[in-house]
Amino acid sequence: MKSEISSDYEELLVVHTGSAIEIPRAQLIRGTMDAMAFCCKKITGICRCNQHAERPDGTCEKFSCWHNVFLVSLLLLLAFFLAGFVIYDNYIEVSRWETASNYIETAIHSPKHRPTTVPMQSPVNSESKDKNGEPCPHGSGALPKGLVQGSSDLEMRSLWGNPIKEGQRKTPHNLLAIPVGIKQKDNVNKMIQKFPADNFTVMLFHYDGVIDKWSEFKWAERAIHVAAINQTKWWFAKRFLHPDIVALYNYIFIWDEDLGVNHFHANRYLAIMEEEGLEISQPALDTSHADVHYGITKLNPHTRVHRRTYNNRGAHQCLENSTAPPCTGWVEMMAPVFSRAAWQCSWGLIQNDLVHGWGMDMKLGYCAQGDRTKKVGIIDSEYILHLGIPSLGGKHNMNVISFRVHGDTRLEVRKRSYIEMEIFKQRWAKAVDEDECWIDPYLKV
């Protein structure tokens, strides 16, 4: 028998995209049934002529597939399911690419490539009223202000007992942070012994990832341990010493691990720093057993504190009227000490992506809370020795180097340090040029 499919059915099988179409309900139902019949014939080949519909010449006036409607329905349902799955899978894939594209586009056009700061309290309507009907001050937020705590600390808390009584106990007022590797544990132990436990919280940045092997020292139980493979002191400081986190501490020591402290005592050092009104300082460096790169950091055995150096030789002379680093208002980055206010400023100076901190030393004086020639100084009576032991990228540390490079890793580290310093200089110049409100207090007229 021969079946005939109307052109109307073919129109119903056309897939329309990009515009909406309207099909009468009766036509849609009839077309669907005929389409099922068509599918039945083409797929199963078992349509039969309705009773009393066979013509004398053997052709059929009307076909019937209803005896296989269940089979056809299953086939169509399976087709719809597979089509829906493919469409959904493609939608997810497209959505992923659109999300990545949007992220990259945002990162490229972002002027500073920095994450967005989210305010702690969401501002409410500026016309909101208080309980007495008076206008609320600007900045009123979603939480009652008496509950919001905008700062924290690094002090550990007990899992039991009375938290109120625990909060009333005396806590250390200063912080010592050191990047450490396990091979320098003996010298680090000597350093920490010079910082009384009742006055200092200790925080160790483990650049080799080793923490458990420090447990032989009793003080290790009260220290804060942070581990990240092959990261620098300033990488750790930017991420874990935010001013709001260390707001409890009066002074913050951010020292290297290779310092000899036989002639140093922390409490005496802080007493001098307070008496001299210093906001940023460092201990003088002993020159009898090690080379010193900058004259201003050299130990002067005849003074308690000095704030400048003199040198009338070479291209970079330091004279009586010199006002710029490294002649005055300068400390080295190996052993700086910051007041709370100075650290709040200095933390902002650290660039999130520049991990070596080169170039920062020349700008720290801007964070001295006043005249850098007076507020930045070197303390001679409590001096230290720089042992000069290479750590990150050093040959003694190759067993923990995870980011391998071809050749001398120390050389590669130094190359990156120079590159970062140039980037920092360019950013400083660009920021100064773009900030119309900022005035350089040390600009020579």
Image (cartoon, helix red, strand yellow):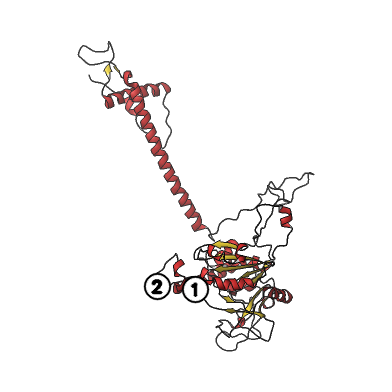
- State the SS at label 1: helix
Is 83 situated above or below 106?
above
Is 13 situated above or below 203?
above
Which picture quadrant has residue 226? bottom right
Query: Looking at this view, is 240 or 220 the one in front?
Result: 220
Which picture quadrant has residue 376? bottom right
Q: Is residue 442 left or right of residue 184?
A: right
Q: Position of residue 49 (x, y in %)?
A: 27, 16
Disc 1 to disc 2, how far (Cα)? 18 Å
Q: Is residue 168 left or right of residue 90?
A: right
Name the residue that disc number 2 marks. 407
Which picture quadrant has residue 252? bottom right
Q: Earlier in the sequence, mark 1 or mark 2?
A: 2
Is 380 situated above or below 226?
below
Q: Position of residue 163 (x, y in %)?
A: 71, 53
Query: Looking at this view, is 217 or 384 the one in front?
Result: 217
Q: Position of residue 146 (x, y in %)?
A: 73, 51
The residue at the far left in this view is 57
Name the residue that disc number 1 marks. 418
The quadrant of the rendering that contains the N terminus is top left
